[in-house]
Amino acid sequence: MIHLQNIEKVYRTDTVETLAINGINLNIAKGEFLSIMGPSGCGKSTLLNIMGLLDEPSKGKISIDEQDLSRFSDQQLAKFRNQKLGFIFQSYHLINDLRVLDNVELPLLYRTSSTKERKMLASAALEKVGLSNRLKHFPTQLSGGQRQRVAIARAIVGNPQIILADEPTGNLDSAMGNEIMEILINLNRNEGTTIVMVTHDENMANKTHRLVRLFDGSQVQ
């Protein structure tokens, strides 16, 4: 599903050059649940952003679902992201002025869905994460675990083939973190969603199919 070939990412300023990712070769199969671990600053989030087409590699090639994305325009990449990928972030990235249902609908605004269809799909996604009784609440009225559930619902509302999760349990206590992991495991198991998760938590990583470790931008396992 995801193929990375000799991926390198260099950040440059006028005086400093930083090699964030160095020579990553990685194949992630359809339906796989992969976790990425490593110390802070080792390139985990940079690698996830490259997989999510939010950042371009300095060198190397990325293909997703057998499509070479190097020739895609920005508009084509945006459409591809919207249709194929779902994102979950540690800090939720919800809009506090919008109700829960409206937050979950957001990815569908870039499609040709009708208002009725958007609300139906958003309600179904919230039901999957156990929040069908919180549709009209605002994010500030929810606990951290509930906000992360809303973020998951937003990630899955468009039925993406791939979910990219950056520390999805990082701001949660262990009990709530385990609940979030169960939702991700069920999405992977029951719907065949390919999931790539960055984590600092060895216990969470051990629940996934495979673990990749990074150190100083290089893959060491």
Image (cartoon, rainbow, N blue to C red):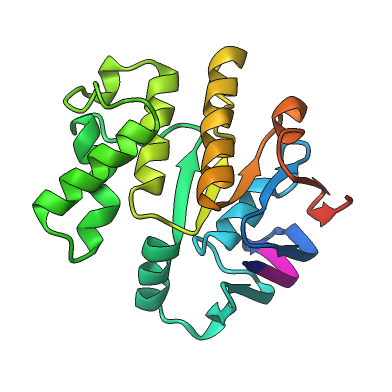
Which residue is located at x 51 percent, y 32 percent? 183
**Relative to residue 207, is residue 88 depicted above or below?**
below
The extreme right residue here reads: 220
Image quadrant where residue 16 sits? bottom right
Q: Position of residue 124 (x, y in %)?
A: 28, 40
Q: Give the main secondary structure of the magenta stretch.
A: strand
Which residue is located at x 75 percent, y 26 percent? 203
Magenta stretch encompasses residue 8:
yes
Q: Position of residue 61 (x, y in %)?
A: 67, 77
The extreme bottom residue here reads: 71
**Relative to residue 96, is residue 111 depicted above or below?**
below
Q: Position of residue 70 (x, y in %)?
A: 56, 81
Does 91 sit left or right of 67 as displayed? Answer: left
Magenta stretch encompasses residue 21:
no
Which residue is located at x 49 percent, y 39 percent? 89
Does 164 sit left or right of 146 as displayed? Answer: right
Q: Nearer the viewer, residue 90 or 135?
A: 135
Which residue is located at x 19 percent, y 39 percent? 102
**Relative to residue 83, is residue 142 depicted above or below?**
above
Q: Which residues are magenta?
A: 3-10
The extreme left residue here reads: 115
Q: Nearer the viewer, residue 78 or 145?
A: 145
Work out whether residue 173 can be spotted.
Answer: no
Q: Quadrant of the N terminus?
A: bottom right
Work out whether residue 145 can be spotted.
Answer: yes
Image quadrant where residue 80 sits? bottom left
Q: What is the tally of numbered marks visible in this picture?
A: 0
